[in-house]
Each structure stands twice: as structure tokens, then as C-alpha cells.
């Protein structure tokens, strides 16, 4: 029986048959008897005083059960909690209530809620509520918002709208810059994005008076965290709330936070004694669910002409929106500033982050959360540096990489990289992409373009395309994370994970994980882990998650933590079960425990594999618990609950190469080739790893080329529907060439690292570097994302190309 | 996204439909494929009191040849026009235009008549109808009339139909087989997006295949309605198919165009420039399809 091969096998995702046949159970699918429907009235103004709200007409409409304003429930709900209150950052957490009381702070801010018998009646009633607003001046961009004359969102509670001011530094940055042979600097913008989970958020709450308990079905990446925060907001004791989140249609970070309206739904269900359901529509999702990124960065790099990077200095203005969402303060600081030296041995580093409140939707964790922002500025400034010293960007990277024999490596910001071979992935990526040939083709195209430009009117279309090649090397901190470290950064809880592995009397196994996979494939990979550890068949393992009444307290799925951390908990739980099973098997086989061999799900006495006890037989004995079955002193049953607190983060890494073609007539960018070489240590299921990498790249490429959340100056979200916000489809995206190297994490029981965010982190700068490379002969240093055709067309039509070659003459062999 | 309350009718014939329109016209909307109307109703931008669903009128859904014309029932789905062998054989630009609309789901349900009457300047059919000089048969209780492609669009999201009228048929003159060609070129941010600009061209060459005998040029998304590039057409009529002439016509069209700044799809200046690029591409393609082997 080849069970040991489960680890590392390309097993089909077990969750897919139910999801692709429409048999998933999402929050919106849950229908209860007597269920009623809530709808939120949201502010049309980005900043305004609420002078009065008249709900009388709305209340009189057919089917309307109740209309409630912020004032009505002010005493019943606590402010929306912020769970990552940074230390040493002068953090100010304003009181932001689930329904605004006297002021609105962004377009979409909820001011009242209607409950009606049908969602249609609820929508009609919203239109009948009369709110008198006194509009105030709004501020939407973070650099303006922290200027002295800017309108204040929370008056003196948050002076200058500055929620925090965070700094990190190491080495001697001033000296590095004073002594630098060359410095480069650039203002880089990491634009705001809309997470766009295809399933919008929603909640359905039901109160059971006979037990004084609430059941809440909710779109969540972390059901226990949701339960805790809902309890804090509503005052309902934690043990009286059950949170269920079965299938979740994508989150990308946006379903980590606990939102005000979710608590309102819980409160209404309890007060009305009716099940209350609320499901966002897409527009509501876009204005009220958190956004991602939104940094303005001032980046400087100091270096030598030989390519050595000696220092880096960053000032960041992070737009946090109108309230501090659950994890928001940690994203542009801890998850960003600590990673600014990336895969390079840069010793001198300084970063200052201004966390600024504005009249926009809150910004919180979005796939990669902080790490894409760090990688973007580092990989862009390294390319700008390479061009300035006329060195091939691959050479500059190789020159500065932390060498493979330097691990574990402590970074200037205090993290300890577990393992890495950065040059290995880069060399592999260059080899697969045919880097040298690409550079030659690029030079030839440019030459032909320059010749044709002089013969006006006779250009052939195919030759009017320029080639650009972009590299991006990254290292990511994930597998969040050792509790002692995350606690020291001000996070409200530790980031361990729980697992219960239960071997039933029949030998079937249920695994209860505190992780909450929603697309990442762990229903499959966790079953593979258990099958490998316990030597049982894959189909005999059930992975259970997303129900606080079934699963021990868990921290949930985000930060590429589930496979390494929740997976680690499962491994240790399995191993403890094996220890106990070995004792029972020894008893059954009348042998010494030391003589028992466990192999492929069978226990036998060393040298006598013919007489074995299967795990199922051992399980049966453990539940039988007769004296011939269970050694004296051993408890019956065969299950274990483990809380695994990892000793360190894990640090996946890699290099991506993007090749673009730029249409010089239109400015359109087409990705011609995309090579990703990633290293996430040991792989449980390479097919799922590839899937995660593909999806990650798609999301990162989307930021580079198409996606941007656009506000007008009055604070209206212009991109408030899917026909405005340009999410790419398979048609726009290239075929990816993926490969991997394998550098196991030395501290993880399985040697694995997370891979859910690597693609998003690596791809954005690879694409932008490629486009800037294609246009380098037009004097282009930087173009702000998204690189839409008009921006490129303007460069092409306003400047004439220079005749120098697009890159250096040196290429690594 | 829940629409306001409305009354729903599902007539089985054109006669029944025009009677309903006669009674409720100003407060009614025809529901054809619903690919624009339903989202507008869900966003509560449109709130018709009466919805007249014509999807059960099977005899509004056809494509057939009649003499020198291709006749298309107003309820014909984009998908049908994309795939129809008759369309591909007689007026291939229709198939090319249909294939550029929205996504497969939109094309399966959306109809040519619904799209035209919706009169969105970003709708793809308008430009192609103009290039082809299509005409439109319209019925009401008062009788029947025909509109040409210069008069079907009145303003943004407003056709020239009266509230009591129903578009029933589109009639397309079939271009001569051996010396005509058409092309629709669309510039979009991503597949399924509204056109940033679009250019439809239908040309007929003279017998020697040297000069333009007939030409129609329609543009998408660069004016309050789908737009005929009249001066560009005039500049080519009777002239030789040369790159210089095509370039000049494309330049003229880009000057005729009246695009507006749009924060998502581009400035008016950019859209003008793209009008030129994509019209020129469409002209080159159409000339090639009409049998010009190499354009000097």
C-alpha cells in the first residue's frame, strides 16, 4: 500500500466536485423559517454631519418590521474593535460605531438599517428614509489628509488624521547615504485595490430563546475571531454564540475583519426573535468591504557602482480609510517595514510610516498584505538603480542576494529567515525564460523600431511592438506566526493554530482544524498529511472547519499560515495519536512498545510484519477499552487536540520573469511570457501549489495592468461595479511557466512553507519592471500603476527614443 | 440589488405587444435579452412600471435572406448572429461584431434589437449598422414605418422610436460577394468591457478593385450616439485604396469624433488618437477582405 506517497502527490482537490456542481453551502444559501431581511442605508456623502433622520415613512411601508438608526442602538453596541494596536507608534484608535450616530465619514458609511419580510421591501424602505445631512469638506488622499488644514474625521481624537506614526531602522543609514557612490530615489504609488471576492459578504443570525444562544452564519476567514469580536461588540457572551462559515467564496483578506453591520444583524436577531439575513450586493461590497494597498512611498537607495546596495530609506503614507479595521495597523507596518531588505544583505535600513485616516472605505489586509507593497518598492528601486549604474538587473540582484550558506539569517529588522537559495531561483528563472536570447531579441526589435520610425507611414504592425523584460525576486514572511513575536507587535492574540484529530472506532478519521480554508485546498492537503502520518486511505479522512461548535478555538486562514501552522498542528496531533496507538498495539501484540514498528498504517513486532494490527483495529481496541484491549493506566479513545505555536515564521522565496510586448500605436501591453520559479519548501500537493501560484500571479498582474479603486475628489468611489473595476479574465492573462526549487524550512515538522500569496507578491513588480524596461529608451524611469494604455501612449507620443541599448552589455551566463 | 416593483406582461404576438405599448407605452419597457435593462433596474437607475417581456414571441427571432437583403428579427440573439452560417456567408461583419459583444453569457441572451433600441453609444451594433446602412422596421398600433441608420439613434440611451413603437426587424443590404469587405475593430480595457473606441467599416471596391465605390464607417463610444464618420467616408469615396488615403480618412474620422474624458477608459484626446488607429486597422482589414492583396 503506497500510502506514504500521499505527501507530495498530485491529488485532485476534494472540495471541487461539490463547488463546481453548485453543492457548496455559502452563507446566502442558508434559508431558515420565518427569516427576515436586513438592508443598510449608507451615506451618499464622504463627510457630513447627520442633522436628522426620519424613519416614519419607511416604517409605514408594507412588510417593514423595524427601522433602526445609529442613535437607536448607540447604547447597545460597542465600537468596531481594532485588534492590531501597534506598540511604540502613538496609535490612536477612534471610536467607530456599527451605525454612525452624528457624522458620516465615507461614501457607504451605514447610518440606518431596515428589516423587512422580503429583500425587495427592505430596499424600498431604504429609499423612504429621510436623512438630512450637512456636507463637510472631504479628504480622500493620505498626503493631503495629514496636512494641518485638512478636515478632521474624528476631530481631536485623531489630530491631523494621523492614526499612527511607526518607525523602524537599523545600521547607519545617514552614513550609508553620505558615503554612497550612487543614490537613486523615486516616488512610488501602490494604488488602492478592491479585493473582489466573488461571494460578497453577509450574515444570517438566529436566536434560540430556549437555550439563550445565537447561531451566526457568516462569511468569515476566521470564525472564532469573528465570534470573539461579535461578542465584544454585542456584549453577548462568547460561549452563547456559535459561528458557522461553511463555504466561503473567496476572501483575499476582506473576510478577516469584523464589520459593524455584522454585529447589527446579530443584535437585531436577538431583539426581534427572528432570523435576520443580510447579504451585500456588489456595489455595497465595493464601498463597504475593506480595500487593499494604497501606499504613497518615497524610496531612496544608496549603492556602489559595482552594484552593491548599501542602504535603503523609505517614507510611506498609508491610507487607512475612515476607520481602523481589525488588522489594519499591522499591514503597512509590521508586515511591510520589516521586509524592506527583502532577499538582499542590506544592513542599513530606515522606514517611517504615517498611517492616515481619510474619507474612504477602510483599508486592511489584501492578499499579501504589506509584503507586496514592500517587494514592489524594493524590486522597482533595484531596477532603477541597475539602470543608473548600467548593470543588468539580474547581476545587481545576484550581487546582493543573501548567500545560501548564510541561513538562518537575521535581517536588520530582526526577523530570522529560516532557509533560502535566492540565487538558485533566479538562475533557474533566467534559464527557463531564455534570458540571454530575450535580451538579444529585444535589442533587435528596438533597432528595427528605430529604423522604421524614420520611414514614416511604412511601418508594419508586427514590428511596432517593443519588448521589455522584468525580473522580480522576493522573500516573504508568512506562516504567521510565533505568538511571542506577534504579541510583541501589538496583535491582540497569539497566532498559533489548533487541531483535533479524532480516530473513530471504525478507524475513520475526522480532523478538526482551526484554519478555515476557502479556496486554498487544505481539505485536500490536510487529508494528505493525515493519510501519510497515520497510514490511512485518503477517503477515510474528513477535514472539518468553519464551525465554532465543532472546532477548538482557531485563528483562521490568512497570511499564508494555514498549511504551515494549522498543518503543523495536525502533524503533531497525528504523532501523539501514533504514540498512544503504539502503546495499544504493543498491548494487543503482547510485545514491548520499543519493538513495535509502524509502517503504512500497520503496527507489528519488529521482524514479524506478517502479524500486524491496523490502525482501525487499534482504534477499535481503544474504544472497547477492555483489559485485553487497553493497557492499564491508558485512557480510552483515540484522539488528540494540539495547539501548535510555530517557533518561527516561514520564508518562501523565488524569482519571476515577465516578458511584455508594448504596442507602440496604442500603448497596450501584452504579456508574452511569464516564468515563475518559487520555493515553498516541501510540497504536499504540487498541483495545488501551482494553482495558488497561478491565481496569485493573476492578482498581481491585475494590479500592474488594470485594477485600481478610483475615488473622485468628493470621495465617490468611481469604480463601484464590476463593469468599472477592471478585473482581468483568462483572456488577458498569459500561460504561466512555473517551476520550483525545494529548500525545506528547517524548523517545520514537514519542511513546508506557505504559498498562497507568493504569486501576488512577486508578479506586480515583475510586470512593471518589464514595461519600464521596454520603454527605457524613451527616458522612462517609472510609470504609476495601473499601466493602462493611455499612460504608455502619452510617453510614446511625447518623447522620442534614444539610441542607447535597453540594458547593459553584461548578462549572466 | 433589488428592483422596484413592476407589473409584468408576457405577450405572445407582435399585435398583443403593440396593444400593450399603446396602453402603457410611456411607463413601460420592453424586456428582450435584458442584458442592459435588468442591471439598470437592479441598480434602480431604470424603474419601469410595466415590463413587457417579448421573449415568447418566437417569430421575432430569425435570420433570413430575402432578395438583396438579409433580414434579422429584432429578438435574434447575438450568439445566433455570431454563429449563423448564413450571416458569415452574406454579411460577415455581423458575425465579427457579435463575437466582440460582452461575454458568452451576454451573447446567449442579449438581442440585436434590444441593443439597438437601448442606444448606448458604447453598444457595438450601432457602428456596424451605420457601416452597413441598415434599416429598421418599427410597428405600433398606428401602423408601420422604416427608419434608416442615420435616424435610428436620437441621443445617448434614446432611440428614435416612440413609446408605443416596437422594433421588429433589421434589414441589411447584402454587399456584393467578390469585391466588398467589412471589419469591426474594438479597443477595450479587457474582454467584455464597454468599448473604449470601436470602428466598423464596410466597403465595396470598383470592378478593378482599385478604388472605393461604396463605403460606410461607424464609430463606437466616441459621440453621444453611435456615430457615422461622414467626412471620412466622403474622403475615400471614389479614391484609390492607398495607405496614405486610409491614413487621411482615419485622421478625418478622429477629428469628427466627439469623445468625452472618462477617468476609467481614457481622455478625449486619447480616444481620438485611438479612433484613428483602430479605424485605420479596420480599413486595412476590410480592404484585404475585399480582395486588395497589398496596400501601397
Image (cartoon, rainbow, N blue to C red):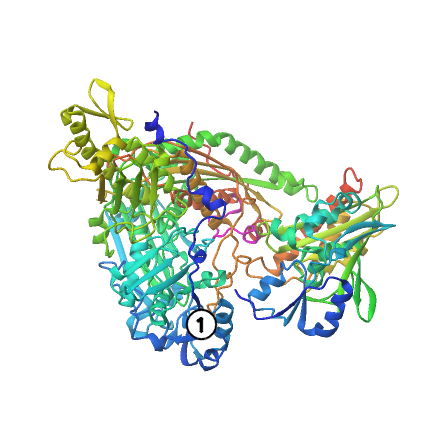
Residue in the foreground of this view, choosing between B296 and A808? B296
- Report how many numbered discs are placed on residues in the image: 1
Residue A482 in percent (x, y) is at 23, 46
- Image quadrant where one finds the C terminus of chain A: top left
Look at the image and give the residue range highlighted in magenta.
Answer: A777-792
Q: Specify the farthest residue to the left.
A: A633
Residue in the foreground of this view, choosing between A106 and A372? A106
Q: Is residue A338 above or below residue A83?
A: above
Does B91 sit left or right of A418 as displayed? right
Dominant secondary structure, magenta:
loop
Residue B20 in percent (x, y) is at 72, 70
Residue in the foreground of this view, choosing between A510 and B293? A510
The chain ID associated with circle 1 is A
Q: Is residue A361 above or below residue A752?
A: below
Is residue A296 something one can see in this rendering?
yes
Query: Which residue is painted at 51% across and 52% down in the image?
Result: A727
Does A442 sit left or right of A393 as displayed? right
Q: Which residue is denoted by mark 1 in the rendering?
A: A43
Query: Which residue is painted at 78% across and 43% down in the image?
Result: B89
Q: Is residue A29 above or below residue A521?
A: below
Residue B33 in percent (x, y) is at 66, 58
Q: Specify the farthest residue to the top.
A: A607
Pointer 1: residues within 10 angstroms few (<14), some, or many (20+)?
A: many
Amino acid at each position: 500500500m503506497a500510502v506514504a506517497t500521499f505527501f507530495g502527490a498530485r491529488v485532485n482537490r476534494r472540495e471541487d466536485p461539490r463547488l463546481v456542481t453548485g453543492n457548496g453551502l455559502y452563507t446566502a444559501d442558508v434559508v431558515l423559517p420565518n427569516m427576515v431581511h436586513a438592508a443598510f442605508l449608507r451615506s451618499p456623502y464622504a463627510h457630513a454631519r447627520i442633522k436628522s433622520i426620519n424613519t416614519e415613512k419607511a416604517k409605514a411601508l408594507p412588510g417593514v418590521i423595524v427601522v433602526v438608526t445609529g442613535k437607536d442602538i448607540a447604547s447597545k453596541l460597542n465600537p468596531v474593535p481594532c485588534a492590531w494596536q501597534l506598540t511604540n507608534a502613538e496609535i490612536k484608535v477612534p471610536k467607530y460605531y456599527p451605525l454612525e450616530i452624528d457624522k458620516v465619514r465615507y461614501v457607504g458609511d451605514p447610518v440606518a438599517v431596515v428589516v423587512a419580510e422580503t429583500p425587495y421591501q427592505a430596499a424600498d424602505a431604504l429609499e423612504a428614509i429621510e436623512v438630512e445631512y450637512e456636507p463637510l469638506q472631504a479628504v480622500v488622499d493620505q498626503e493631503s489628509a495629514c496636512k494641518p488644514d485638512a478636515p478632521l474625521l474624528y476631530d481631536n481624537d485623531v489630530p491631523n488624521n494621523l492614526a499612527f506614526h511607526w518607525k523602524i531602522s537599523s545600521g547607519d543609514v545617514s552614513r550609508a547615504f553620505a558615503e554612497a557612490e550612487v543614490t537613486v530615489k523615486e516616488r512610488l504609488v501602490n494604488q488602492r485595490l478592491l479585493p473582489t471576492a466573488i461571494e460578497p459578504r453577509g450574515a444570517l443570525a438566529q436566536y434560540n430563546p430556549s437555550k439563550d444562544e445565537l447561531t451566526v452564519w457568516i462569511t468569515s476567514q476566521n470564525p472564532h475571531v469573528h465570534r470573539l469580536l461579535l461578542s465584544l461588540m454585542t456584549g453577548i457572551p462568547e460561549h452563547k454564540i456559535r459561528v458557522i462559515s461553511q463555504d466561503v467564496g473567496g476572501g483575499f483578506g476582506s473576510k478577516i475583519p469584523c464589520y459593524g453591520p455584522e454585529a447589527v444583524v446579530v443584535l437585531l436577531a436577538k431583539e426581534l426573535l427572528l432570523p435576520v439575513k443580510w447579504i451585500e450586493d456588489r456595489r455595497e461590497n465595493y464601498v463597504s468591504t475593506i480595500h487593499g494597498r494604497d501606499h504613497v512611498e518615497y524610496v531612496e537607495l544608496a549603492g556602489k557602482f559595482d552594484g552593491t546596495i548599501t542602504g535603503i530609506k523609505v517614507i510611506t503614507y498609508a491610507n487607512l480609510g475612515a476607520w481602523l479595521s481589525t488588522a489594519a495597523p499591522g499591514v503597512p507596518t509590521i508586515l511591510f517595514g520589516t521586509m524592506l531588505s527583502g532577499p538582499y544583505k542590506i544592513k542599513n535600513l530606515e522606514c517611517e510610516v504615517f498611517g492616515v485616516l481619510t474619507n474612504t472605505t477602510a483599508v486592511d489586509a489584501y492578499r499579501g498584505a504589506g509584503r507586496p507593497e514592500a517587494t514592489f518598492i524594493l524590486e522597482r528601486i533595484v531596477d532603477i538603480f541597475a539602470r543608473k549604474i548600467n548593470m543588468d538587473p539580474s547581476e545587481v540582484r545576484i550581487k546582493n542576494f543573501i548567500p545560501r550558506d548564510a541561513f538562518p539569517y537575521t535581517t536588520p529588522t530582526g526577523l530570522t529567515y529560516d532557509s533560502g537559495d535566492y540565487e538558485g531561483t533566479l538562475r533557474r528563472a533566467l534559464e527557463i525564460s531564455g534570458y540571454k536570447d530575450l535580451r538579444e531579441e529585444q535589442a533587435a526589435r528596438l533597432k528595427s523600431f528605430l529604423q522604421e520610425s524614420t520611414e514614416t507611414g511604412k511601418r508594419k504592425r508586427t514590428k511596432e511592438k517593443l519588448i521589455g523584460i522584468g525580473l522580480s525576486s522576493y522573500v516573504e514572511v508568512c506562516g504567521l506566526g510565533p505568538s511571542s513575536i506577534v504579541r510583541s507587535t501589538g496583535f491582540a492574540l497569539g497566532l498559533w493554530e489548533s487541531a483535533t484529530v479524532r480516530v473513530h472506532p471504525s478507524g475513520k478519521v475526522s480532523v478538526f482544524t482551526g484554519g478555515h480554508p476557502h479556496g486554498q485546498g487544505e481539505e485536500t492537503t490536510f487529508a494528505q498529511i493525515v493519510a501519510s502520518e497515520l497510514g490511512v486511505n485518503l477517503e477515510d479522512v474528513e477535514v472539518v472547519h468553519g464551525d465554532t461548535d465543532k472546532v477548538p478555538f482557531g485563528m483562521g486562514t490568512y497570511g499564508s499560515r494555514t498549511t504551515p501552522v494549522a498543518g503543523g498542528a495536525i502533524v503533531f496531533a497525528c504523532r501523539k495519536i501514533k504514540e498512544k496507538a503504539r502503546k495499544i498495539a504493543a498491548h494487543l501484540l503482547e510485545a514491548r512498545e520499543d519493538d513495535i514498528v509502524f509502517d503504512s498504517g500497520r503496527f507489528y513486532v519488529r521482524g514479524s510484519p506478517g502479524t500486524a494490527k491496523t490502525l482501525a483495529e487499534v482504534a477499535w481496541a481503544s474504544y472497547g477499552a477492555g483489559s485485553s484491549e487497553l493497557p492499564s493506566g491508558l485512557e480510552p479513545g483515540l484522539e488528540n487536540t494540539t495547539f501548535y505555536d510555530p517557533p518561527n515564521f516561514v520564508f518562501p522565496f523565488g524569482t519571476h520573469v515577465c516578458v511584455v510586448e508594448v504596442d507602440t500605436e496604442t500603448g497596450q501591453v501584452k504579456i508574452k511570457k511569464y516564468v515563475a520559479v518559487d520555493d515553498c519548501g516541501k510540497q504536499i500537493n504540487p498541483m495545488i501549489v501551482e494553482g495558488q501560484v497561478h491565481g496569485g500571479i493573476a492578482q498581481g498582474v491585475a494590479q500592474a495592468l488594470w485594477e485600481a479603486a478610483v475615488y473622485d475628489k468628493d470621495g465617490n468611489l468611481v469604480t463601484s461595479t464590476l463593469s468599472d473595476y477592471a478585473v482581468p479574465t483568462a483572456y488577458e492573462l498569459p500561460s504561466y511557466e512555473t517551476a520550483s526549487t525545494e529548500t525545506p524550512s528547517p524548523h517545520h515538522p514537514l519542511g513546508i512553507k506557505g504559498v498562497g500569496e507568493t504569486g501576488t507578491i512577486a508578479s506586480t513588480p515583475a510586470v512593471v519592471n518589464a514595461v519600464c524596461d521596454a520603454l527605457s529608451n524613451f527616458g522612462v524611469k517609472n510609470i504609476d500603476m495601473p499601466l493602462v494604455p493611455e499612460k504608455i501612449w502619452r510617453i510614446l507620443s511625447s518623447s522620442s527614443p534614444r539610441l542607447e541599448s535597453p540594458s547593459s552589455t553584461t548578462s549572466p551566463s | 440589488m433589488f428592483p422596484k416593483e413592476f407589473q409584468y406582461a408576457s405577450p405572445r404576438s407582435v399585435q398583443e405587444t403593440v396593444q400593450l405599448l399603446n396602453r402603457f407605452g410611456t411607463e413601460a419597457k420592453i424586456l428582450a435579452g435584458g442584458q442592459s435593462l435588468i442591471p439598470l433596474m437592479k441598480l434602480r437607475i431604470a424603474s419601469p412600471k410595466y415590463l413587457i417581456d417579448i421573449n415568447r414571441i418566437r417569430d421575432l427571432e430569425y435570420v433570413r435572406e430575402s432578395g438583396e437583403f438579409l433580414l434579422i428579427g429584432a429578438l435574434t440573439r447575438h450568439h445566433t448572429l455570431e454563429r449563423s452560417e448564413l450571416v458569415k456567408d452574406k454579411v460577415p461583419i455581423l458575425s465579427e461584431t457579435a463575437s466582440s459583444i460582452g461575454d458568452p453569457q451576454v451573447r446567449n441572451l442579449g438581442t440585436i434589437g434590444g441593443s439597438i433600441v437601448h442606444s448606448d453609444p458604447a453598444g457595438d451594433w450601432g457602428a456596424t449598422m451605420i457601416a452597413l446602412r441598415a434599416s429598421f422596421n418599427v410597428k405600433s398600433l398606428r401602423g408601420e414605418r422604416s427608419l434608416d441608420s442615420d435616424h435610428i439613434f436620437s441621443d445617448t440611451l434614446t432611440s428614435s422610436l416612440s413609446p408605443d413603437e416596437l422594433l421588429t426587424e433589421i434589414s441589411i443590404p447584402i454587399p456584393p460577394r467578390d469585391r466588398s469587405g467589412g471589419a469591426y475593430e474594438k479597443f477595450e480595457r479587457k474582454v467584455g468591457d464597454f468599448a473604449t473606441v470601436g470602428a466598423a467599416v464596410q466597403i465595396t471596391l470598383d470592378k478593378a478593385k482599385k478604388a472605393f465605390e461604396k463605403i460606410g464607417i461607424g464609430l463606437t463610444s466616441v459621440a453621444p450616439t453611435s456615430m457615422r464618420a461622414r467626412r471620412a467616408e466622403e474622403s475615400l469615396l471614389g479614391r484609390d485604396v492607398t495607405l496614405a488615403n486610409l491614413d487621411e480618412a482615419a485622421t478625418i474620422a478622429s477629428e469628427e469624433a466627439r469623445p468625452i474624458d472618462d477617468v476609467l477608459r481614457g481622455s478625449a484626446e486619447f480616444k481620438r488618437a485611438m479612433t484613428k488607429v483602430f479605424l485605420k486597422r479596420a480599413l486595412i482589414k476590410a480592404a484585404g477582405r475585399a480582395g486588395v492583396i497589398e496596400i501601397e
